[in-house]
Amino acid sequence: MTGQTLSHNLLPGEDILDIDPHPQTAGRQARPLRFITCGSVDDGKSTLIGRLLWDTKAVKEDQAAALRRDSTGKQNELGLPDFALLLDGLQAEREQGITIDVAYRYFSSDRRSFIVADTPGHVQYTRNMATGASTADLAVLLVDARAGILEQTRRHATIAALMGIRQFVLAVNKIDLSNYDEAGFQAIARSFREIALSLGVRQVTAIPVSALKGENIVLRGDDVMPWYSGPTLVEALEKATQRTGQTTGFRLPVQRVSRPGEGFRGYQGTVAGGSIKPGDSVVVLPSGVEANVKAIVTYDLVRNAAVHGDAITLVLDRPVDVARGDMIAAIDQRPMTGRAFTARLVALSPDGIVPGKRYWLKAGSRRQRVMVRPTSALDLSTGNWDDATFLPVNGIGVVELDFEDTAIFDAYETNRDTGAFILIDPETFNTVAGGMIDGKRSKSGRFDALPDADRATITLPARLIEAFLKTEFARAHAGEIKVAGPEETEE
Amino acid sequence: MNVIEHGRGKPPLDPHLKALENEAIHIFREVAAEFERPVMLYSIGKDSSVLLHLALKAFHPGKLPFPLVHIDTGWKFPEMIAFRDQVVAKHGLDLIAHTNPDGLRDQVTPFSHGSARYTDIMKTQALKQALDIGKYDAAFGGARRDEEASRAKERIYSFRTSDHAWDPRNQRPELWSIYNGMIHAGESVRAFPLSNWTEVDIWRYIQAERIDLVPLYFAARRKIVERDGMMILAEDKRLELLPDEIVREEMVRFRTLGCFPLTGAVPSSATTLDEVITELEIATVSERQGRAIDRDQSGSMEKKKREGYF
């Protein structure tokens, strides 16, 4: 196993759509790729992750020795330790034999490093998956080659897409137990691609694998699957793109005001969109005061530019009133500000989300009171959004948010950093929901204010219609949406 | 005021390390802004050295808006204490060293009480005392998720009850990079800016940023003795040799630093950072292999953490 080298040829896999033909340069010249694995114990998920860690040598000898000690009699037929024990770090899990929470694993190939959010397959999977998916660039969905696509697969794909993941890898596991059946694999890949497309995900790579035997995970399985010419799992991960997708202008949520003395006043935060350079004009929100950037200070250098992701200290050219929770934004590409928004929400707490209850909402560095009113909930088995006024734990719903003072957001679709928020229960202080902003709401835009709520007409500029039709929501409701040119519009 | 630039002439970080650095700085600033009395746990080791460097970056051009606490068991390597004092002087830090007075009174040593009880009294209880004395509501630590299985599931904000206990089954979900810092009176968080770093990342960062380290991390001829399958440094008079133990000199270094009687050296010829990194990349054992306290009971680390260990 250790004597073989990895093949890094970019193979023209027929199951790859839209893969970036110019992947980021080799080695540590890229940020770590974050991905989530979805599947149940039965699908062999622990074995798959264990295999990834084992074959990339992320597991060291003493850890393996501890595994062997703990897994007496549980070694598999290949003489390898029980990978599930490696992953299930907590005693409670070992005792119950289940994975109860999100665990993070780290491994590297020669070309890239990876952070895996390993989430449980069944119990409370929605909230744990949502947590893992919130920071993931890609989702690996695992199915058993003999069982094919299950309702669970569809659910996992739906949650991943909802959280904004736009790249899927389908690992068709236990392919050895299906006698390496190519036709069976192709049929599973085809039906999965349809599901993915219905969710607006076009980057799909399907890979036949045996996690137990280590085929097409890190090392190729050409001997047993000569019919498969696509990438191994690790190759697919190496080629994946990062979910930067920030299409907004400059955003700096202010975390702290730094006043070390002698007239220095800097605003510290992490750039959450766009880029900035000295001389650029910015607006401070919610006050609306305008200023120009004087300097971008870091410990190393006073810089001539900063981009998305950089932790900086910004100095402005005039004394303005800026506090933690404010946002400094590009003057010509401002975020939405207002007191009423709509959002999609994943309920994380056992109490669910109660209509009319006031929560704390935290987005970036800004925390404020909000009233939350669920209007519909997603039925994961049908994919339909049904009317609802309450969201139980693990429920996914559309909600209306009403603030007492100005809130500042971008749509999650356009900026994950400035479009995401959490809800905090005002009594327990627990994090009870994760939310994604859809847009701003105005009184006239409320559907319940329309005379006939069954069918309404919205007119949009053509370019916005195109963007709207590409959204996951529009794709999920393609059958219900009618697009008409101006001459056909019913007034 | 004149803003000092510390990175003149230094090549920029690669995108991988830059992303990890940005994340850590973000966490530092968020905790410092949201909590009333933050503190940083400083253990003098390589991870603490990286943590301190990141803290200095996060608050530049200002000073650290919190003190450092060092839990001194009295059994640290002497070179560690000398290094600590140098670092404090160099950066003008506010450092509080705390030793458990009960343990001192009862003459608790790794030899008299065994590693598990000694660690509980001189590290876990001492840490709780120090946090209680300072009424700290947030404590930065250098723990990484790749170190040990129970840490793989720990959040970046890890909540502790007023007794400093951790409940791994009742952790708050942590989505995106939005951290919930709301706590009730008496509760606290341990915040881990290095959660997503691996051991190799730490070393690469030390190299790229030219961070000073305790010399024990680099190979040198040192006096050692074999005990319980570990190579223990035999330079302190308090180490009483057992009848069949022989002190010998060997080229060794330490992959982690703790209390010298409980920390094993590894044979190594790596005397420079480059050589240490090369050695790591072909290493087949994990760094905690040299730590006796992880192995004294099954599920050891989780148990210690539930009781308040860092």
Image (tube, rainbow, N blue to C red):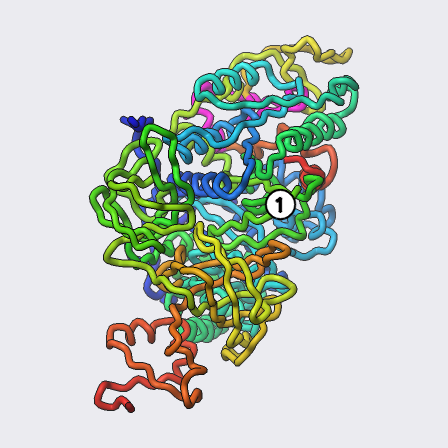
Residue A165: percent from the left, percent from the top?
Answer: 43, 62
Image label count: 1
Asked if residue A122 lies left or right of residue A138, the reply is right
Which residue in the structure is indicated by mark 1?
B159
- Compared with A142, B62 (above or below) is above
Q: Determine crowd level at label 1: few under 14, some 14-19, many 20+ residues with C-alpha closer than 10 A.
A: many
Residue farthest top in this picture: B237
| SS state under label 1 | strand
Q: Would residue B269 be counted in the magenta stretch?
A: yes
Q: Would residue B134 be counted in the magenta stretch?
A: no
- Compared with B307, A252 (above or below) is below
Asked if residue B219 can be seen in this view, the reply is no
Residue B100: percent from the left, percent from the top?
Answer: 70, 23
Q: Residue at x 27, y 89 (%)?
A: A489
Asked if residue B295 lies left or right of residue A347, the reply is right
- Going by the numbered disc 1, the residue's amino acid type is Phe
Q: Nearer the viewer, residue A376 or A148?
A: A376
Q: Nearer the viewer, residue A258 or B198?
A: A258
Residue B32: percent from the left, percent from the top?
Answer: 49, 39
Q: Residue at x 51, y 49 (%)?
A: B179
Asked if residue A275 lies left or right of residue A163, the reply is left
| Magenta span of residues | B254-282
Q: Residue at x 35, y 49 (%)?
A: A252
Residue A445: percent from the left, percent from the top?
Answer: 38, 77
Quarter holding residue B75: top right
Q: Chain of mark 1?
A: B
- Compared with A95, B309 (above or below) is above
Q: Residue at x 63, y 25 (%)?
A: B71
- Compared with A330, A229 (above or below) is below
Give the quadrant of the N terminus of chain B: top left
Asked if residue A334 can be seen in this view, the reply is yes
Give the quadrant of the C terminus of chain B: top right
